[in-house]
Amino acid sequence: MKQVVQNYKSGELAVLDVPVPGCKPGGVLVRSAYSLISTGTELMKVSEAGMSMVGKARSRPDQVAKVMQSVATNGVPATYRKVMGKLDSYTPLGYSLCGVVEQVGTGIDDVKAGDLVACAGNEHALHAELNWVPKNLYAQLPDGLAPRHAAFGTVGSIALQGVRRGEPQLGDVALVIGLGLIGQLVAQLLTASGVRVVGADPDPARCELAERLGAAACGDPSSAAVETAVAELTGGHGVDQVYLAAGGGSNQPVELAARLCRDRGRVVDIGKCRLDLPWNAYYEKELDVRFSRSYGPGRYDPEYELEGRDYPIGYVRWTERRNLACFLDLLARGRVDVEPLVSHIAAFDDAVETYQRLKDGELKAVAVLFRYPDPVEHPAEATAPAVAVPAVNVPAADVRRSPGRATRTPVRLAFVGAGNYATSMLLPHLAQRDGVTLSTVVTTTALSAANAKRKFGFAEATTDLDAVLGDPAIDAVFVVTRHSSHAELTRKALLADKAVFVEKPLALTEDELAGVLAAVEESGNDRLQVGFNRRFAPLLHEARARFGARTGPASLRYLVNAGRLQHGSWYLQQGTEGSRFAGEGGHFIDTASWLLGADPVSVYALAAPGNEDLQVVLRYPDGSTATLTYVTTGPPGFPKETLDLIADGKVLRLDDFARAAVYDGRRRRWVGSRLPKARDKGQSAELAAFIKAVRTGGPMPVPLASLAATTAATLAVRAALVGGVPVTLEGAR
C-alpha cells in the first residue's frame, strides 16, 4: 500500500510503498476514502523539517532539553547516534480520515466490514491507503453523512473539546482568535450552542467566511473593528470566553485576550501560540486560563487509546470517542457545515506536490482533502459514471426442483425465531391451516420456544438449529429472527435442502446476498421466498386488475409514514441490525416493482439531515420511475402507506390498504374499500402461495431473480446516500 511520509532530517516528503498493517485484536483495518490535511499542525511540522539543525532546535526547545539530559546520562557520542538515527528516518503524517472497514479484529462487535467510519490519531489515522485503528479512535458514520465531511472528525473533536473547556452558556459572547480550520469550527460550534461569536484574524477572506457561517462580526486583531464589536455585543463588559486558535510566535493573541475578556472570564488555549501572559492584566481580571488537550479525555492514555478501556460515562461524559461521535452527529444534522471550509481536494498520488504548494503559499487553503483511489464519492466530487453495485448473478441453470408432493400430505414446518412478527402476523395464519403441520420451533432461549409451542401447537420446541436442519421430516424452514442473522440462516437452510421463507430483509450487505445466491448455486435448491407480502394484498391485486395493462412508461409515488420507534427497539441497533430502511425498505421496492412489472436498473437517494427520512428514486428498463418517500417524522394519525400509479392517462390510488380507486379520464371508474380494522396486507395469501409451492413442487411465488434484485436495490440506497450519485444495478433486467 502507499503512505505519505517525511524525513525530519532532510525535509524530504514522499509517497512510499509500505506493507499493509495487520488487523490486530481490539481494532479494525480501514481503507481510506478521504483524509484531511491539517493546514496548521501538519504544515508546521513540514516547515520545521525544512529548517537547519539550529532552526529545528530553536523551534523545539522541549526536545533540546531532552537531548541535553541524554548527553548528561549517556554521553555525546551515544546521544548523537540516537538523535541522528531518529531524525534520519521516515515519520508519518496525518491524523484525521474517513474510510471503509475492511477487516474486523477480535473483540470488536460494534462495526463490521463495509461500514463507514471516521478515524482519529496521529499513529492510526494517517495519510495511508490502509490503517489499523483501535476501538476508541473510530466512530461509525450516521446515515447520510458524506465521507469527505466525516474526514473532518478529528479536527472537529479538537474544536469541540476546546469549546467544552470554555463552558459556554446560552447568551454568552465569545472571542475566537485565529480563524484557520480549528478556529472556523470553534466559531460554528459556539454559534450552534447559542453563543454570539466575534472572530479575529488578519486574513479578510477567513473573516468573511466565519461571518458567512454564523459569526456576529470578524476583523483584523490589530484594527479597532474587533474591540468595537465586543463593546457593542457585551455592553462594554468584555467577552465571557476567549478561544486561542492561532499559531505562530507572536504574543498578540494572549494580550488581546486579556484586553477584551471580562472580569473573571475564561481564556482557552486550543492552538499552539506563544503564551507569555502579561501578569498584571491577567491578575487584575483574575482570568481563568485553561488548556484544551487535543480530542478530549483519553488522549495520551495508552490504556484508553490502545487497549480500548473506556472511561465510565458517569464519571467522564465526553471522551475522545464520544467527542468524535458527537461531532459526526452535528455534521449529519446540519448544525455544523464543513463544505465551505474545503479549499482543495487532491488525489492521494499528488500528496507531495500538494504539501509543497501549501508550504510555498501557492495554495491558499483552510482545509485540504486527499481523495484515495476508488473512494466513496460525493456529489461535488463525482466525475465518474454512476457508482456500480456488484452484479447480482442469479443462478439460472442446474437448479434442482424439489419433488412434488401428494396433495393430502401435510407440509411440515419449522420456525426459527418466535418474536412479535412471527407470533402476530405469520403463525396465526398457519396454525389453523389445513395441510400444514407446525413441527418444531427453534429459539435462542428455552422459554420463548416453550411459549410458542404452547400457544400455536408446535410438536416440539428446541434451541438446537442443527438438529432441525438435519431432520429429513422438515419440509420448510421459516427464518423470523433479527435482521443480522437472516442471510446466514437462509444459507444454511438452503444447503440443508429445505424450502425457506425468510422475513425481510434477505441480506444486509452485498456479501451476504452473494452468499445466499452461492448457496443456491451450490445446492441446486432455489426454494426461497422473502416476506414481501404487499404484492399479495387482495385490494391491491384487484386495483391492478382494474387498472389494466399499460402501454407507456409509468410514474409511481409511494409515501411511507413509518413513524418513530419506541426507545429501546432493537431496530435502532444500526451497528448490528442495519438501518431501519435496510430492514423494511424492500417491502416498498418490491411492491413498486410488482406494479411496474420489472426490476429496477438504478437507484438514487437523498436523506433529510438528523433523521431517517429518505427520498428514493428507482428507474426501470422501460423508462418508468418510482419515487419512494420514507419518513419517520410524520404525524401518527396520517395513513402509513399511500400510493399513486400514473400511466396512459389513468391513475391507481391506494390508501393504506383500506381504500383503492382507479381514475380514467375525468371519471373515477372503480372504488374498493375495506374496514380499517380489516386491512389485509397480503400475509395470508402470501403464506398460502408459499405452502402450495412447497406441497406441489411448483415454482416459488416470487422469482429468485426478483428477490435478489429487490434486495440489491435496497442495499444500493445506502451507497447512493453516501455517494450522492445514482447507483447502477448491474445485471438488472
Image: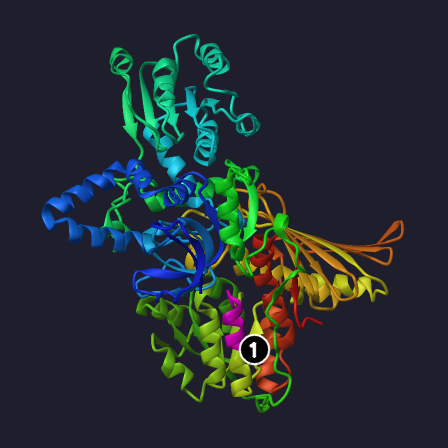
Q: Is residue 461 left or right of residue 548?
A: left
Name the residue type under label 1: Leu
Confirm whether residue 432 shows in the render: no
- 462 or 387, which lies in front? 387
State the image coordinates of residue 262 (x, y, percent, origin top left): 35, 13
State the image coordinates of residue 290 (x, y, percent, origin top left): 28, 27
Furthest residue to the right?
A: 665
Confirm whether residue 10 shows in the render: yes
Image quadrant where one finds the C terminus:
bottom right
Q: Residue at x 26, y 10 (%)?
A: 284
Q: Provide the residue designation for mark 1.
A: 528
The stretch of residues the image draws in magenta is 507-517
- Name the image quarter holding residue 276: top left
- Name the image quarter holding residue 652: bottom right
Q: Residue at x 37, y 25 (%)?
A: 250
Furthest residue to the left?
A: 73
Image quadrant where one finds the N terminus:
bottom left
State the image coordinates of residue 259 (x, y, percent, origin top left): 36, 13
- 675 or 125, which lies in front? 125
Location of residue 423 with respect to 518 vertically, above or below: above
Location of residue 424 with respect to 150 vertically, above or below: below
Q: Is residue 306 left or right of residue 733?
A: left
Tell me, yes or no, whether the highlighted magenta stretch contains residue 491. Answer: no
Q: Residue at x 34, y 53 (%)?
A: 123
Element assignment for label 1: strand
